[in-house]
Amino acid sequence: MGNIRRYFEPGMAYFVTSVTYKRKAVFAEEKAVNLFLLTIEYLKLSLDYRIFAFCILSEHIHFIIQPFGKYNLSYIMLMIKGNFSRRFNKMYDSTGHIWQKRFYDEGIRNEGMLISKIEYIHNNPLKHGIVADIDKFVYSSYQHYFNGKTCLLKIDPIDIS
């Protein structure tokens, strides 16, 4: 089977999952989480995308992203993962892979699907037994949606029309 290309629709939001290389606990330290969040926020300015939800676990991440400029999801993910990897390796004086090569994405087709994916993202720390109370988990957009608090990454207003 040849190289299968991803299909993108302009203006569509995507549920994205990316896993670290060999499921290494890259995000076990707050310093690495903060670096990843800064990378996402910084690249939003030049790559034109919105973030509607996120969750960062020790060895994988989930987020909902909506490209709206000239760059497609594959390019945006390449830039996010590449920029983070270079800075992570420099910060920890290490070398090598940080991410698995591919990532999983699913186009969000309607409001019901969007709500379902946001709930999935926010319940992920419970599912993996990281916390017993989701209110205690700070590496997600849960606080933004359910407690009206500012979370670690700016969440953009939702517009999937």
Image (cartoon, grey):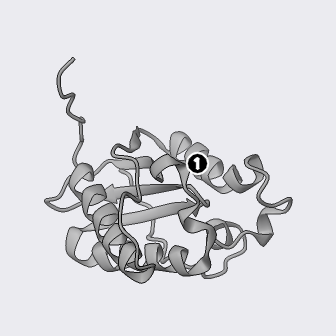
Three-letter code, disc 1: Ile
Nearest the eye: 18 or 122:
18
Q: Which x, y percent locates residue 80?
A: 32, 65
Nearest the eye: 49 or 132:
132
- Residue in view at x 52 percent, y 40 percent: 113
Answer above or below: position of 161 versus 82: above
Q: Farthest residue in the right direction?
A: 132
Q: Farthest residue in the top direction?
A: 1
Q: Does 38 sit left or right of 127 as displayed?
A: left
Q: Which x, y percent locates residue 142?
A: 66, 66
Q: Which x, y percent locates residue 133?
A: 84, 62
Q: Which x, y percent locates residue 104?
A: 41, 41
Mark 1 surroundings within 10 Å by alpha-carbon count, few (fewer than 14), some (14 through 19), many (20 or more): few
Q: Quadrant of residue 107?
A: top left
On the question of residue 151 being in view, the answer is no
Q: Does 152 sit left or right of 82 as displayed?
A: right
- Residue in view at x 38 percent, y 52 percent: 160
Q: Does 66 sit left or right of 71 as displayed?
A: right
- Residue in view at x 24 percent, y 36 percent: 6
- Residue in view at x 55 percent, y 41 percent: 112
- Look at the image and tell me in which quarter the N terminus lies: top left
On the question of residue 98 being in view, the answer is yes
Answer above or below: position of 110 versus 85: above
Say what secondary structure mark 1 lies in. Answer: helix
Answer above or below: position of 144 versus 11: below
Residue hosting label 1: 115
Q: Quadrant of residue 49?
A: bottom left
